Image: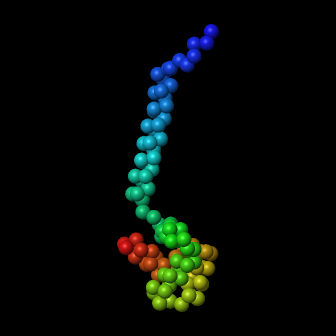
């Protein structure tokens, strides 16, 4: 004989515990993400994505603020891709954006 749906309290407690666990983990992740600063490379990537432009365009804009030639920005971007080192004028540009 079928009794139909039988409600069990332990099942509800397990479900609520799982919801609480995921909410606590989400809040902790957000807390730690706000406490750890972005590196210059992450800031470069983040700024480019927020503006809808490429990292190369960020290099060109940074070079323009330092009155450097676009050719220098091109060469520095190629070096960045090979070596992963940001030039000083790009770091300065990104840090000034952070303060705005």
Quadrant of the rendered image containing residue 92? bottom left
Residue 54: name its quadrant. Answer: bottom right
Q: Position of residue 88 (x, y in %)?
A: 47, 80
Q: Residue at x 61, y 79 (%)?
A: 78
- The one nearer the camera, 39 or 46, is 46
Q: Can you see residue 44?
A: no
Image coordinates of residue 3 in percent, x first then y, are: 57, 13
Residue at 49 percent of width and 29 percent of height? 14
Across and down, in percent, residue 74 comes to: 59, 84
Tell me if residue 59 comes above or below residue 9 in the rendering: below
Looking at the figure, which quarter contains the C terminus?
Answer: bottom left
8 lies above or below 45: above
Task: Please report the residue visible at 49 percent of the width from the left and 31 percent of the height from the top.
Answer: 15
Q: In this rendered view, identify the residue nearer to me: 31 or 82.
A: 31
Quarter occupied by the N terminus? top right
- For the view shown, which residue lies furthest in the top direction? 1
Residue lying at the far left in this picture: please name it. Answer: 99
**Is residue 19 left or right of 83 when viewed as pictured?**
left
Query: What's the residue at 42%, 63% (across, down)?
Result: 37
In the image, residue 78 sits, relative to residue 39, either above or below, namely below
Residue 6 shown left or right of residue 29 in the figure: right
Residue 15 appears in the picture as rendered = yes
Between 99 and 50, the one lying in front of the other is 50
Colour treatment of the image: rainbow
């Amino acid at each position: 004989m079928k009794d139909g749906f039988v409600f069990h309290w332990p099942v509800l407690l397990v479900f609520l515990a799982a919801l609480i666990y995921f909410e606590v983990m989400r809040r902790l992740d957000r807390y730690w993400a706000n406490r750890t600063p972005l590196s210059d490379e992450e800031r470069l990537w983040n700024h480019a994505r927020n503006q809808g432009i490429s990292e190369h365009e960020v290099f060109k804009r940074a070079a323009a603020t330092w009155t450097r030639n676009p050719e220098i920005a091109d060469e520095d971007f190629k070096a960045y891709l090979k070596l992963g080192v940001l030039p000083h004028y790009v770091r300065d540009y990104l840090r000034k954006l952070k303060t705005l």
